[in-house]
Amino acid sequence: MGYDQPMRLHITVDDELVAELDQRAGRRRRSAFIAELIRRGLDDERRWDDIEAALGAIPDEGHEWDDDPGEWVRRQRADQRRVG
């Protein structure tokens, strides 16, 4: 679905929002600013899709940490195989 050149969009925005956009990004940077906001918004939407898809993936019980979550965390942090 790639395009050879950037796609033009026509959107309607009230004057107050345009004034705030110009104050934040400048008149000459409207398109770049809006494109970046769209990228961020779509990235957030994808992340939420992943989170929602994972809901319920871990059962409510039967974990190593059920008896003492604090102790489980301490063991995880002390593990030499830990990354980070």
Image (cartoon, rainbow, N blue to C red):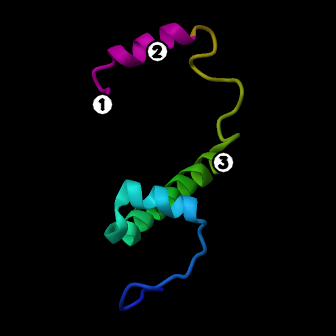
Look at the image and tell me in which quarter the C terminus lies: top left
- What residue is drawn where x is 36% and y is 17%? 77
Q: On the image, which quarter does residue 14 sit in?
A: bottom right
Residue in the picture at 41% in, 89% down: 3
Up-down relation of residue 9 to residue 16 (above or below): below
Label 3, label 2: how far apart the Cα atoms are: 25 Å
Helix, strand or loop status at disc 3: helix
Is 11 situated above or below 82? Answer: below
Q: Is residue 80 magenta?
A: yes
Q: Earlier in the sequence, mark 2 or mark 1?
A: 2
Say which mark, if any, is on residue 83: 1
Density class for disc 2 (Cα within 10 Å; few <14, some 14-19, many ≥20) is few
Dominant SS in magenta: helix
- At label 1, the amino acid type is Val
Label annotation for residue 73: 2
Extent of the magenta region = 69-83
In terms of sequence position, does the residue under pointer 3 or pointer 2 come before the other?
A: 3
